[in-house]
Each structure stands twice: as C-alpha cells, then as structure tokens.
Image (tube, rainbow, N blue to C red):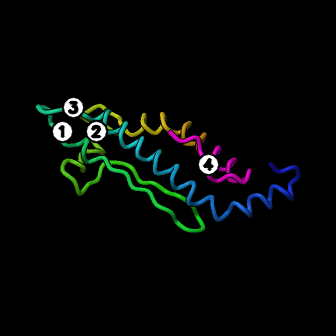
Amino acid sequence: MADTLESLAADFAAAAGLVEPASLVVVERAAAAIRDDWRAAWTFGAGTTVPYLAAAVTSEAGLLPGVGAWAEIGPDNSLEQGPLGDLLEFGSVHNAPRPGGGPAVLKETPLLVAELEATLEALTAGSPADAGPGR
C-alpha cells in the first residue's frame, strides 16, 4: 500500500488500466442483483393486472472508456407491460406506489460500495487477481 501521496498517485496510475474492466465486473453483478430483487418485488403471478411486468425489468451494463462502468436497470418499455412500470413504481393519482426498484437499489448499494472499495484496494496492492470479494 502507499506510504506517501506520491506513491499513492503512482499506485493509481499503475492501476488505471485495470480499474475500468474490474469495476465493470462489479457493476454488472450489482445490476443483475438489483434487477433480480426488482423482479421478485413485482412478481404478482397470474390473475393480476400486471402478470408480465416482472419480466419487463431488465439490466444492461457497459464500459465508457475514460469514464467508467455504467448500468441501466428498470422496466423496458419495448417489452410487454414495460410501459406500466412507472405507474407501479411511483403510483398515480388513483394508485399508491408499489416500489420495486428503490428498495432493490437501497439493498444493493452498501454491497456495491464495499465491492468497489475492495476491488480498488486489490488493484492498488498489486494483486488484480484478488480484486473484489466476489459472491
């Protein structure tokens, strides 16, 4: 680990090429976990007015070079009942909200932060093979 500010800067510079791909792995895992929790919250089954909404919740992650990893998670409006996602998540004047995404993000955030910190620690310690706690 770095003893001085200069050595810390050198550690970060050495790890720069490894941080983006390593963080993408962590972000992809977190996005999948949020998607799965969101789907579980919205699984109402047959006989409801939105039996296909859970299947419309998707996740996608990628890497924007020089910026970092990103993820998009939520109801896909191009899938069956996907456009109804906003009504369920946020409610309307006639319906109370039935949030799925908000609680899923709140549940996953501490795990995501811990995994990103562990990944950065492993990369700056010079052992990228040990990056992230994994699950």
Which of the numbered marks, if any, corresponds to residue 50? 1
Specify the segment rendered in magenta: 116-135
Q: Residue 101: image x %, image y %? A: 39, 40
Query: How many callouts does the rendering have?
Result: 4
Q: Nearer the viewer, residue 6 or 129?
A: 129
The amino acid on which the numbered mark 1 sits, given as a three-letter code, is: Val
The crowding category of the residue bearing disc 2, from other C-alpha atoms within 10 Å (few below 14, some 14 to 19, many at least 20), is some
Q: Which residue is mark 2?
A: 88
Amino acid type shown at disc 3: Phe
The CA span between labels 2 and 1 is 9 Å
Which structural element holds mark 2? Answer: helix
Looking at marks 2 and 1 on the same chain, the residue that comes earlier in the sequence is marked by 1
Decide: few, some or many residues near mark 1? Use Cα within 10 Å; few <14, some 14-19, many ≥20.
some
Residue 109: x and y, percent? 53, 39
Residue mark closest to the camera, 1 vs 4: 4
Q: Residue at x 35, y 48 (%)?
A: 74
Is tag 3's residue or tag 2's residue first in the polypeptide sequence? 3
Q: Residues within 10 Å of mark 3 (few under 14, many from 20)?
A: some
Mark 3 or 2: in front is 3
Give the prevailing secondary structure in the magenta stretch: helix
* Front in this rendered view, residue 9 or 119: 119
Q: Residue at x 77, y 58 (%)?
A: 11
Cα–Cα gap, marks 1 and 3: 7 Å
Mark 1 and mark 3 in contact? Answer it, CB < 8 Å. yes
Residue under label 3: 44
Evaluate if marks 2 and 1 touch, with contact meaning CB atoms under 8 Å apart: yes
User: Which numbered disc, 2 or 1, marks the residue closer to the eye?
Assistant: 1
Real-space Cα separation, disc 4 to disc 3, in angstroms: 38 Å
User: Which quadrant of the view contains residue 133?
Assistant: top right
Q: Kindly identify which residue carries mark 4.
A: 131
Q: Residue at x 45, y 54 (%)?
A: 71
